[in-house]
Amino acid sequence: MQKLKYPYCHVKTICCCLLTVLIPLGAKTQPIPTVEENIPFLVTFSSDSEVSWGDDDFSQVFFFVIPEDKKSPVYIRVFDPDVGGQHDEDRTGFSSSTKFSVYGGRGCISAKEATSIEPLEGYKTGNLLDSKVFGEDTEYDNRWYTFGPFNPMEGELMQEYGGYILKIVAEGLKGDDGNLYRYFLSTKADDNQPVEGGNAFTFEYTFRLSNDQAQISHLYPYVNDRVVSVKFSNFDWDDDGYIKVVSVARRGDFAKISKENEWANSTHAISESEKSTSLDVQFIKKKSKLVKNNNVVLYITNQYGEFLPFYTAPIGGIPKFKYSIGVQKK
Ligand SMILES: [Ca+2]
Ligand SMILES: [Ca+2]
Ligand SMILES: [Ca+2]
């Protein structure tokens, strides 16, 4: 299918709930992707790559949430920011570079371009706080690079999202290889120390699945109280098993899955009991044949075409199917 053209989302309407009160007390930002997501790596390909390798737009945006009462500096750490050596996807010999840029300030998320899933002109809104380009760089292969320190107040204060927001954009520059990497929002420059009450989210997730077919990866989109239906759009799933949706009211529905180099989408009704909860989207690999190094893209829209945020620490916790709710599902 075609992606929506100029599909801006409206921040204030997407997150009209006060997420601050919904983030579980004591929640910590963990590695991004988190342990609960069980996703080995984020992935961003360089600009000469084929989209059939699993990245539709060679760009990935993540937002970090820092609670309003946090006054001390934070650091954004990137694991394996280089494109070479371990972890990365070598196509024709490593020849690629990736630019990581950190933004804060007004418009960092509130500008309509900022929350588009397309890297449209102007999506890198806000104040550029720092950036660095990495190529085949042995210094940071299988190691951490640290951006910061950042004063939380350098972010954009958005109470709808639970505090100050910093944005990081990973952008594939020249080359045709895949950069695999992870993030950590830390209180320390040289160590991963979680920010109490912190979180992170994105509107389009591009990631690598495990090569261990027993591993199930998860994403946790947040469904606010205005959502009556959701449309799942996945790209280049390579017909690899199932994408299953679990919620408080849903034992497991199956989303339509894509094959090689194609989008697939399916629409699912949201019941009253699922409003203001997270869904658990499970990526269950095929057991009969290994689809190796599978990169995949997922985004979700509501009935207005607005994008749902995927929080790395799910809002309200990981949903568990409750039989008593499921049988009453409207
Ligand atoms: Ca590497
Ligand atoms: Ca890398
Ligand atoms: Ca794929």
Image: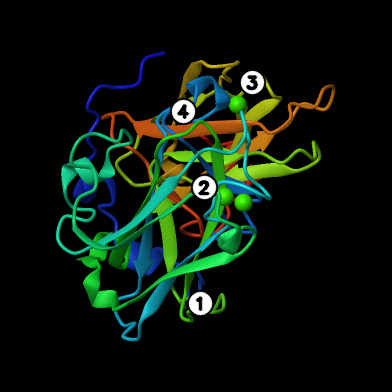
Label 3 sits on a secondary structure element that is loop
- Residue 301 rendering spot, x and y as whole percentages: 36, 32
Task: Pick whichever, 126 or 100, lies toward us.
Answer: 100
Query: Which residue is identified by label 4?
Result: 232
Callout 3 touching callout 2 (CB < 8 Å)? no
Label 4 sits on a secondary structure element that is strand
- Residue 206 rendering spot, x and y as whole percentages: 50, 38
The tag on residue 120 is none
- Along the polypeptide, which appears first: circle 2 or circle 4? 2
- Along the polypeptide, which appears first: circle 4 or circle 3? 4
- Residue 6 rendering spot, x and y as whole percentages: 22, 27
Residue occupying the point 48% across, 59% down: 316
Query: Which residue is identified by label 1?
Result: 26
Dot 4 amino acid type: Phe
Residue occupying the point 27% across, 45% down: 14
Dot 3 amino acid type: Asp
Establish if 202 lies above or below 176: below
Query: Which residue is identified by label 3?
Result: 238
Disc 2 crowd, CA 10 A, few/some/many (<14, 14-19, 20+): many
Disc 3 crowd, CA 10 A, few/some/many (<14, 14-19, 20+): many
Callout 1 touching callout 2 (CB < 8 Å)? no
> Does residue 56 appear to the left or right of 305 in the view shown?
right
- Along the polypeptide, which appears first: circle 3 or circle 1? 1
**Label 1, label 4: how far apart the Cα atoms are:** 31 Å
